[in-house]
Amino acid sequence: MHDLGKLFMIIGLVIVVTGALLWSGYGNWIGRLPGDVRVERGNSGFYFPIVTCIVISVVLSLLMWLFRR
């Protein structure tokens, strides 16, 4: 149980730091990368951040790989 509590503390700190960075305006590029799909017609619009999802997936995969070693 000690390891589980340590894991929750690390995850919580990562979430807090990420939230603080996004709130400060550092993460303005998230969702605005070249390749993100945006279609606007009239009063409606569709937005799918495909490249942003790929970047986040690669970063999370690298972090998981590093923590497993």
Image (cartoon, rainbow, N blue to C red):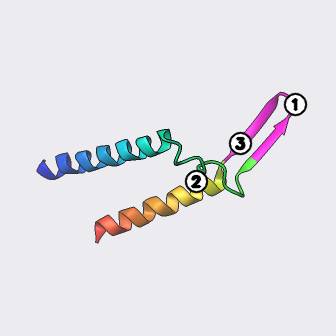
| Residue 30 x/y as whole percent | 58, 49
Residue under numbered circle 2: 53
User: The C terminus is located in which quarter?
Assistant: bottom left
Q: Is residue 29 left or right of residue 58?
A: right
Residue 42 shown in magenta? yes
Neighbours of disc 1 within 10 Å: few (<14), some (14-19), many (20+)? few
The local secondary structure at tag 1 comes to loop
The residue singled out by tag 1 in the image is: 42
Q: Residue at x 51, y 58 (%)?
A: 57
**Nearer the N terminus, badge 1 or badge 3?**
1
Query: Considering the numbered disc 3 on the image, is that residue within a helix, a strand or a loop?
Result: strand
Residue that numbered label 3 is attached to:
47
Q: Is residue 37 left or right of residue 28?
A: right
Residue 28 image point, x, y percent: 59, 46
Q: CA distance from mark 1 to mark 2?
A: 27 Å
Name the outermost residue toward the top.
43
Identity of the amino acid at label 2? Cys
Amino acid type, label 3: Tyr
* Element under disc 2: helix
Region in magenta? 38-48
Q: Give coordinates of residue 13: x percent, y percent.
A: 30, 46
Using residue 55 as the reference point, say whether residue 1 is left or right of it.
left
